[in-house]
Amino acid sequence: MAIARVVIVGAGHGGFQVAASLRQNGFDGAVVLIGDEPHLPYQRPPLSKDYLDGKIGFDLLQMRPESFFADQRIELVSGSAVTAIDRAGKSVALDDGSRVAYDHLVLATGARNRVPPLPGIELDGVCYLRNLAETEALKERLAACRSAVVIGAGFIGLEFAAIARGKGVPVHIVELVDRVMARVVCPETSAYFGREHQRTGVEFSFGARVERIGGAGGKVEHVVLGDGRTLPADLVLISIGVLPNEGLAAAVGLAVENGIVVNEQLLTADPNISAIGDCASFPSRHSLRNPVRLEAVQNAADHARCVASRLVGKPHVYEALPWFWSEQGALRLQIAGLTTGFQQVVLRGDYDAGEYSAFCYAGDKLLGIESINKPADHAFARRLLAAGRGVSPAEAADPDFDLRAAAMARS
Amino acid sequence: MPQVTYVSHTGTSTTLDVPLGTSVMQAATLHGLDGIVAECGGSCMCATCHVYVQEDQLAKCPEMELGEDAMLDGTASPRRPNSRLSCQLVMTPEMAGLVVTMPETQT
């Protein structure tokens, strides 16, 4: 039976893209896009960058103007949370008690902040940076901030730190492990970024555990570390990662394992339900370890295109190359591929000057390339890795090896 | 207000007002134009806002920086001598009347 009605839960990058791509692919049925935030679908990456910095307004965050949704016959249901799925009846329940029927359901529910069970976590001044409302609150707080403590030295914590330092705010980052971005980059790149942030005045406590957040009158005043040190703070940013929103799927018996389990076409065990983006755990030919769950705009949007294509009768296996980026002050980090499980790193370029790429290998297999202020390498890396071809460690280490020629010739 | 004409790869033209200081990419996405993806939101990180600028207007555009030049080597559709990333084409008075053609695919 042809699919006449697609319902998408989650109006972030992935959900929005499913709707847009269905129409681009000529899908003529009903498209319902349900989001729990009150705004038009917007882009998240600038939240921790230009938007927090005050350089752009909401108009430039919007994916598309309001008229787009009417023109494209995309029924946008904003400010509504889906509370349950009825698989047998093929419908979802909304928090206002209404029901929305589907022929095919796409779960693009994203992820939510990990909230540490710390005493004082409820204090005024404890902030997060994932959605627009959180960013607005953080921005307002930052404008009057005298001293900020960041818990977690990942992308978000470091991007925030760069902006806060740019405004002259003292920043102290507390990190459980011994280096920045430990989950996503090699130790060499961690060292470079750690050093550069220190150069701009960011203070770090590595291998440090937060004991509690303290305050008075309901407002945060300091953070107490496990070693007894007290760091003054009128703003505490919690940036220790996210958890996938898999509850809706789990509640109806769909497999979840660090995300909603899907096959290589991003379909769950229910042929009428797909899952994409940050909430989906999927097999990737680019990963040493499977399944994987990725938190990235590229992943969400490419997942969306894959599902939209399947829903109009052109199914294919998802195999887009993952890539990521982060902007931290003047530092530009671009990553192509998935480097988890690497055993060897070859640096190419001028590491000390901060214009280099780190080629990450497992044996002789090139897993991914981190490019720091080296966009050309990133462009070539994407071509090489997408084509499934490598560059040997010896080639990567050879300054005379022509990476451009290799990328262009082999793609 | 200056205008920019966007031509789809199938030849359909759309002319938009583009305020000074706004990029050719921003104007396109704000108006919901298909053909410019701009996955990274305009940070010169993704090469999915690729356009071909009408040859005789290339000199009116801002000079290409190294980052853009590099990312143009990673576009999904072929790079040509008149290829630019539209997130880097920030509108100036000289650019009024610009015509850009969007490639067949951005991803």
Image: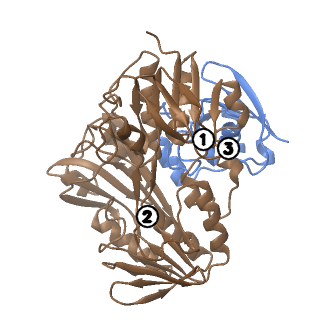
Chain colours: A brown, B blue
Q: Which mark is residue B80?
A: none
The quarter in which the N terminus of chain B is drawn is: top right
- Could you tell me how far apart the alpha carbons at marks 1 and 3 are, in whole angstroms? 28 Å
Q: Which of marks 1 and 3 is in front?
A: 1
Q: In this view, does A315 lie above or below A138?
A: above
Assign a secondary structure to mark 2. Answer: loop
Q: Is residue B49 above or below residue A368?
A: above
Residue type, numbered disc 1: Ser
Both labels 3 and 2 in a single chain: no
* Residue drawn at x 21%, y 53% as measured from the top left: A361
Q: Nearer the viewer, mark 3 or mark 2?
A: 2
Residue type, numbered disc 2: Val
Q: The disc numbered 1 marks a residue on which chain?
A: A
Quickly name the residue at label 3: B26
Q: Is residue A299 visible?
A: no
Q: Which of B66 and A173 is in front in this view?
A: A173
Q: Residue A115 carries which label?
A: 2
Q: The disc numbered 3 marks a residue on which chain?
A: B
Q: Which of marks 1 and 2 is nearer the N terminus?
A: 1
* Residue drawn at x 34%, y 68% as measured from the top left: A190
- Could you tell me how far apart the alpha carbons at marks 1 and 2 are, in whole angstroms? 23 Å
Q: Are marks 3 and 2 in contact (CB under 8 Å)?
A: no
Q: Is residue A194 left or right of residue A401?
A: right
* Residue drawn at x 24%, y 46% as measured from the top left: A391
Q: In which quarter of the image is residue A226?
A: bottom left
Q: Which mark is residue A80?
A: 1
Both labels 1 and 2 in a single chain: yes
